[in-house]
Amino acid sequence: SSEEVFVSVDDESQSGKVPLNTATKEQLMTISGIGEAFAQRIIDYRELNGKFTDLAQLKNIDGIGEKRYQKWYPYLTLD
């Protein structure tokens, strides 16, 4: 009995979390509240600044404050 029912992409971690440093826009958009615009901002930030070394760096992105960060970080992992 597999508990990873909702994980369909092979390169996702065992936890089923979305890997912030390698996720595609589509993967990011599987998280509730992350639409196309935020997904693109996250990818743009990553391309400009290199890999995230701390999930809290999301708060450096325009429009992402403490409230959104608290909502999203349980669904994210660095790699």
Image (cartoon, grey):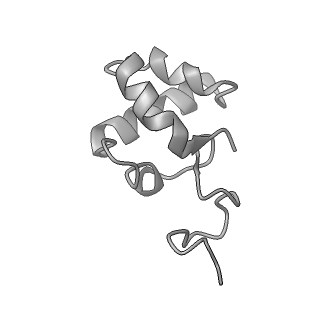
Q: Position of residue 72 (x, y in %)?
A: 44, 36
Q: Quadrant of residue 53?
A: top right
Q: Is residue 49 left or right of residue 39?
A: right
User: Where 9 falls versus 66 (above or below)?
Assistant: below
Residue drawn 64% across and 79% down? 2
Quadrant holding the N terminus: bottom right
Residue 13 is left or right of residue 56, and the answer is: right
Residue that sits furthest to the front in the current view: 1
The image position of residue 47, as x and y in percent, is 56, 32
Q: 13 or 41: nearer the eye?
A: 13
Image quarter of the C terminus: top right
- Residue name at image x 36 percent, y 22 percent: 67
**Quarter holding residue 57:** top right
Task: Judge whether residue 62 can be spotted in this image.
Answer: yes
Up-down relation of residue 3 to residue 24 (above or below): below
Relative height, residue 65 to residue 17 (above, below): above
Whether residue 64 is visible here, answered yes or no, is no
Residue 52 or residue 4, whichever sits in front: 4
Judging depth in this view, the residue of 10 and 71 nearest the camera is 71
Q: Position of residue 44 (x, y in %)?
A: 46, 32
Residue under the point 66% across and 31% down = 51
Q: Residue at x 47, y 55 (%)?
A: 27
Q: Is residue 33 above or below residue 56?
A: below
The image shows a total of numbered marks equal to 0
